[in-house]
Image (cartoon, rainbow, N blue to C red):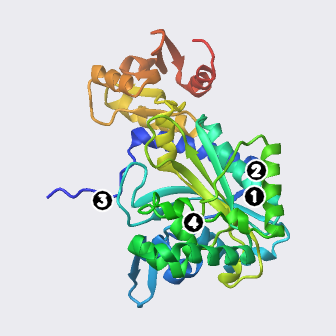
C-alpha cells in the first residue's frame, strides 16, 4: 500500500529547496541589518498558552489547533502561530532583565492549523516572524513594518500594498466594542452562527468574518478610528508620520482588525496586487500586542511583531514572474576508471571537499560515458579524470565542461589549481 503525505502537507523536494534556502538567507540578511537576533521555540506548547495568548474566541483556538494529550495527561498543542511562543520564551527566560532592550527577535518555524488546504495555505505551513518586546515607541512600529516590507522588496517583489489601522488602547477598544454591539445587535439573526457568538465574546472579529464580509451591516459598521482617544490618535499619527518619512506608502483600512485577540494600537497587513495571484491577497500580518507579556505572567512589557508565510511569498514571486538567482551547478565531478583509480578518487574527493571545493563522483559503477552524462546532468563546471595512465604519471586530467579544454595537473597541485580555476582563473 502506498502511503502519501497527509492532506494539507507537502514535500519540499531538492529542486525547490534551493529556492527556500535563498529566500531564508535573504530574510536573515535583512534581519541582521536591522539588528534582530534569531530565537527558536518548541514545535508544541501547553494548550493554555494559545488559549490565553491568542484568545478563546479566535478561529485558531476554536477550530484550527492540533491539540492532543501526552502520556502524562497534559494537553499540548502544535504551535499554530509564533508570537505567543516567543513571548512565553521571553517571560520564562527573563529576557526582560537583559541590559539590551528592547529584545528584537526573529524566527523561522513550522506552524500547524487545521483548515481547508488551498494555494499557499497548508495545514503545516512555514512562517517567518519578527517580534520586538520592550518598547512602546511608535518608531518601533514603523521599523517592524519596514522590516517586513524590505524582506519582500529584497526578493524583488514590487506589487505590494500595505494596509494599516489602529485598534487603540484598552479604553478606546472598550468604547468601540460597545459601539459594535449596539450596531450589530439589531442584525444578529442575519449573521452567521460564528458572528452571533462573536457579538458577545469579541465583536471586532465580526469585521474580519469571511462569511458575512459583504453584509450591509459590516459595510456600515462604525469605524474604530472614530473611537480612538487622544493618546491613541496621537500614537497612530506618529506611526503614519514615520512610515511617510521612510517613504513606505500605506492605506488606512478602518475594518482591519486581524484575527487574534492580543492586538491593540497598530495593526497591519501586506498584500500582493500581482495579477493572477488569487482572491486571498494577504502575504503578511501583524501588529502591536501590549499586555500579552503580562497575560503570560511577565512584567508590563509592550510588544509588536508580524508573521509571514513562506509558501505565499513563493507564490507571489511566481505571480510577478521573479526568477530567484539559484544555481544548479556543481564545481567538479570526479571520473575514475579502474580499481586503483577508484580508491584514489575517494581519497582525493574528500581532500578537495575539506578545502572548500564542491565535488561529487560516481557511485553506480558506470562506464566513462555514463559518468560524463552524470557530470552533464549535475551541470559540473569541471570534470577530473583519473585512469591508469594518469595514476602512473601522478597527474589528473582536468576538463572544462564549458570550453572543452583539458589540462594535466600534478596531483599535489590539484587543490591550488582548482581553487584558482573556480575563482575565475584561466586553464
Question: In whole angstroms, how far apart are the C-alphas of marks 3 and 2?
Answer: 37 Å
The answer to which of 161 and 412 lies nearer the viewer is 161
Question: In whole angstroms, how far apart are the C-alphas of marks 3 and 4?
Answer: 22 Å
User: In the picture shown, does residue 351 fall above or below 381?
Assistant: below
Q: Give residue 117's quadrant in the image.
A: bottom left
Other residues around mark 1 within 10 Å, as few (<14) / some (14–19) / many (≥20) = many
Other residues around mark 3 within 10 Å, as few (<14) / some (14–19) / many (≥20) = few
Q: Position of residue 111 (x, y in %)?
A: 48, 63
Residue 279 seen by the camera: yes
Residue 292 seen by the camera: no
Indicate which disc residue 82 carries. Answer: 4
Side of 239 where 92 appears, left or right: left
State if disc 1 and disc 3 touch (CB < 8 Å).
no
Callout 2: SS: loop
* Residue that numbered label 1 is attached to: 141
Residue at image point 58% right, 64% down: 221
Q: Position of residue 146 (x, y in %)?
A: 72, 48
Q: Earlier in the sequence, mark 3 or mark 1?
A: 3
Residue extending furthest toward the bottom: 73
Indicate which disc residue 7 carries. Answer: 3
Question: In whole angstroms, how far apart are the C-alphas of marks 2 and 1?
Answer: 13 Å
State if disc 1 and disc 4 touch (CB < 8 Å).
no
The answer to which of 27 and 210 lies nearer the viewer is 210
Other residues around mark 2 within 10 Å, as few (<14) / some (14–19) / many (≥20) = some
Question: In whole angstroms, how far apart are the C-alphas of marks 2 and 4?
Answer: 20 Å
Q: Earlier in the sequence, mark 3 or mark 2?
A: 3
Q: Position of residue 300 (x, y in %)?
A: 77, 80
* Residue that numbered label 2 is attached to: 34
Question: In whole angstroms, how far apart are the C-alphas of marks 3 and 1?
Answer: 37 Å
Question: In whole angstroms, how far apart are the C-alphas of marks 4 and 1?
Answer: 18 Å
Residue at image point 51% right, 50% down: 310
Image quadrant occupied by the N terminus: bottom left
Amino acid at each position: 500500500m502506498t502511503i502519501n503525505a497527509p492532506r494539507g502537507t507537502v514535500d519540499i523536494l531538492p529542486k525547490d529547496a534551493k529556492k527556500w534556502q535563498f529566500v531564508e538567507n535573504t530574510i536573515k540578511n535583512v534581519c541582521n541589518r536591522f539588528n534582530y537576533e534569531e530565537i527558536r521555540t518548541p514545535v508544541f506548547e501547553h494548550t493554555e498558552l494559545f488559549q490565553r495568548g491568542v484568545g478563546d474566541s479566535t478561529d485558531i483556538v476554536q477550530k484550527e489547533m492540533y491539540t492532543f494529550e501526552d502520556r502524562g495527561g497534559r494537553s499540548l498543542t502544535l504551535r499554530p502561530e509564533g508570537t505567543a511562543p516567543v513571548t512565553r520564551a521571553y517571560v520564562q527566560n527573563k529576557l526582560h532583565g537583559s541590559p539590551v532592550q528592547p529584545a528584537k527577535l526573529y524566527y523561522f518555524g513550522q506552524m500547524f492549523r487545521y483548515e481547508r488546504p488551498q494555494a499557499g495555505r497548508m495545514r503545516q505551513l512555514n512562517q517567518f516572524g519578527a517580534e520586538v518586546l520592550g518598547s512602546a515607541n511608535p518608531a518601533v512600529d514603523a521599523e517592524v513594518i519596514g522590516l517586513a516590507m524590505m524582506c519582500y522588496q529584497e526578493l524583488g517583489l514590487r506589487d505590494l500594498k500595505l494596509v494599516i489601522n489602529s485598534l487603540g488602547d484598552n479604553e478606546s477598544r472598550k468604547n468601540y466594542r460597545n459601539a459594535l454591539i449596539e450596531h450589530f445587535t439589531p442584525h444578529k439573526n442575519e449573521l452567521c452562527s460564528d458572528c452571533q457568538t462573536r457579538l458577545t465574546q469579541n465583536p471586532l472579529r465580526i469585521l474580519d468574518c469571511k462569511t458575512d464580509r459583504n453584509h450591509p451591516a459590516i459595510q456600515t459598521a462604525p469605524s474604530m478610528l472614530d473611537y480612538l482617544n487622544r493618546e491613541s490618535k496621537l500614537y497612530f499619527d506618529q506611526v503614519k508620520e514615520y512610515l511617510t518619512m521612510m517613504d513606505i506608502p500605506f492605506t488606512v483600512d478602518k475594518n482591519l482588525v486581524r484575527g487574534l485577540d492580543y492586538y491593540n494600537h497598530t495593526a497591519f497587513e501586506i498584500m500582493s496586487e500581482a495579477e493572477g495571484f488569487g482572491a486571498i491577497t494577504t502575504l503578511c500580518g501583524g501588529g502591536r500586542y501590549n499586555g500579552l507579556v503580562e497575560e503570560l505572567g511577565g512584567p508590563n512589557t509592550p510588544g509588536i511583531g508580524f508573521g509571514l508565510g513562506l509558501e505565499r511569498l513563493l507564490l507571489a514571486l511566481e505571480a510577478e514572474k521573479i526568477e530567484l538567482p539559484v544555481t544548479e551547478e556543481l564545481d567538479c565531478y570526479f571520473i575514475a576508471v579502474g580499481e586503483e583509480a577508484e580508491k584514489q578518487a575517494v581519497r582525493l574527493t574528500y581532500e578537495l571537499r575539506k578545502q572548500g571545493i564542491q565535488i561529487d563522483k560516481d557511485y553506480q559503477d558506470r562506464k566513462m560515458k555514463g559518468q560524463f552524462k552524470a557530470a552533464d546532468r549535475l551541470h559540473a563546471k569541471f570534470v577530473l579524470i583519473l585512469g591508469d595512465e594518469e595514476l602512473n604519471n601522478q597527474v589528473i586530467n582536468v576538463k572544462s565542461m564549458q570550453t572543452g579544454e583539458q589540462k594535466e595537473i600534478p596531483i599535489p597541485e590539484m587543490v591550488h589549481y582548482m581553487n584558482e580555476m573556480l575563482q575565475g582563473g584561466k586553464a
